[in-house]
Image: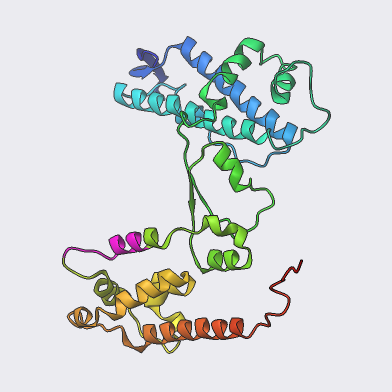
Amino acid sequence: MPRIEEVKLFFSEPSGQFRTEIAFRMPEDDIKAWLREEARIVKLAYLIKLRYSISANAPPKPSSFHFDRPHKSYSIAKRMICVACEWFAIWMGHISYLIAKTEILVPNGEQDRSSPAPDWYNYLLKYPEFNEAWLDGLSLSAACTFDQKTPRAGIIFQWSDAHKHREPIQWFYDHHIPLWFIWSNKEEEAILNDYSLAYLQPPEELVEEALTRLFSTPNVPLAGLIMQRYFRLGSDPITNKTVEFLRLQHAPSFVFEFTAKRFLRQELSLRRFGATADASLSALKASRDNEIQVAAQAASSFPYHGLLVTVEE
């Protein structure tokens, strides 16, 4: 954290007289040093993205928080300088992502094998802004450390949607990036069609525990509160506002069954609020039960010939 110094600013009034104000800012040498490092990391990110055709939006620059300007008070100057200082860490994360991407991408042109260092390292040495000492420091920093000791922000990963530019799940695991998976009927159907994805399905006990916590309130049942605020009867249970609010039509089988039973069992509690589960939720549950039954009957009618092979000696 650099020191903050007091400076005098001179202004020319329309009358021709001069006016002075006291302001606070970083020392000029520190401002130049920060701007120089900012320009260097911004260019590094640009060159790596160009070299490997990486599609990624850069965060705002640290100077966007005006660490290079004088401020009216000491507290404002300190706050803006602190934010800008911490924002350099955001750029470290951005560069870390780009460097990690180089491991699975082919550079534009031939790989630079002028040293045992990675291609991006050798490629950047061609530019005067980057020397071996600076690149070695980058290589030894947290930006290039991908073990569990380096905390990283997690992401919500909807693996059921294909995306040609997105990294595979294993890539995130290898770089110890926390993942949270969306669990809906779309993912459930994908697993039914490809059982190799079954490892992505959460245990039912874990789902039940999460739903139980969600629906547990000290006094008022969550179902009653939702019914009171969001329940609007409709002719189609799929468009019913309560169902839409809960997104039950998109819920996996276990989540739907658990939630529907929870709601339908709380009829007495709901009446206190002048709301009822009515036939809409019951109709949707009956519809889902019928779909499961039809699917089970269809599966039981499949021919068994050819599924079992007996080997005779």
At 49% from the left and 86% from the top, the residue drawn is 290
- Residue 57 x, y percent position in the rendering: 60, 41
17 displayed left or right of 47: left
Quadrant including the C terminus: bottom right
Percent x, y of residue 243: 40, 76
Q: Say whether residue 235 is magenta.
A: no
Confirm whether the magenta stretch covers residue 214. Answer: yes
Q: Position of residue 227 (x, y in %)?
A: 29, 76
Residue at x 49%, y 65% (from the top left corner): 184
The image quadrant that residue 262 belongs to is bottom left
- Placement of 70 over or under 28, stated as above or below: below
Q: Is residue 83 left or right of residue 141?
A: left
Q: Give the residues in magenta.
A: 208-218
Percent position of residue 198, x then y: 55, 59
Looking at this view, name the residue that lies furthest to the right: 110
Which quarter of the image is occupied by the N terminus? top left
Predominant secondary structure in magenta? helix
Is residue 235 depicted above or below 2 in this figure? below
Model colouring? rainbow
Note whether residue 219 is visible. yes
